[in-house]
Amino acid sequence: VINNPKIEQLKERNRIILEKRSQVLRFYLIENVIPILSEGILNISQELPENPTEFLQQYLEKIAIEQQQKMNEDQNNVL
């Protein structure tokens, strides 16, 4: 394998770009997705439903409705 400095620079540049892009995604997941999924999984471990996938689906749908209602209330309070 021949080490070409230009190829190595390009690889490093691409790695940096990928790292920056992934930071945004990781932050979004940490702030918005992981807490909700963790709570849903905790509920599954407490309830031990027969169909955990369906249970999680229903939990997430319930959370989505609650979040939408809160957003609507917040918008109404601004007006």
Image (cartoon, grey):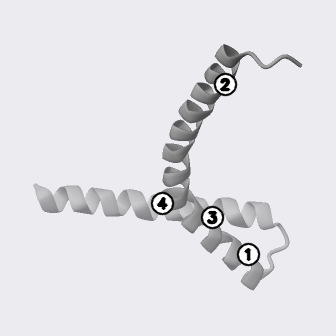
* 10 w.r.t. 31: above or below: above
Q: Which residue is mark 1?
A: 44
Q: Is residue 18 left or right of residue 57?
A: left
Q: Earlier in the sequence, mark 2 or mark 1?
A: 2
Q: Residue at x 76, y 80 (%)?
A: 45
Which element is circle 1 on?
Answer: helix
Classify 10 Å Cα crowding around label 2: few (below 14), some (14-19), many (20 and above): few
Q: Position of residue 62 (x, y in %)?
A: 54, 64
Amino acid, disc 1:
Ile
Q: Earlier in the sequence, mark 3 or mark 1?
A: 3
Q: Which residue is mark 2?
A: 11
Q: Nearer the viewer, mark 3 or mark 4?
A: 4
Q: Earlier in the sequence, mark 2 or mark 4?
A: 2
**Of 35 and 62, which appears nearest the observer?**
35
Q: How many marks?
A: 4
Q: Which residue is mark 4?
A: 31
Cβ atoms under marks 3 and 4 closer than 8 Å: no
Q: Residue at x 77, y 61 (%)?
A: 53
Q: Is residue 73 left or right of residue 21?
A: left
Q: Residue at x 57, y 26 (%)?
A: 13
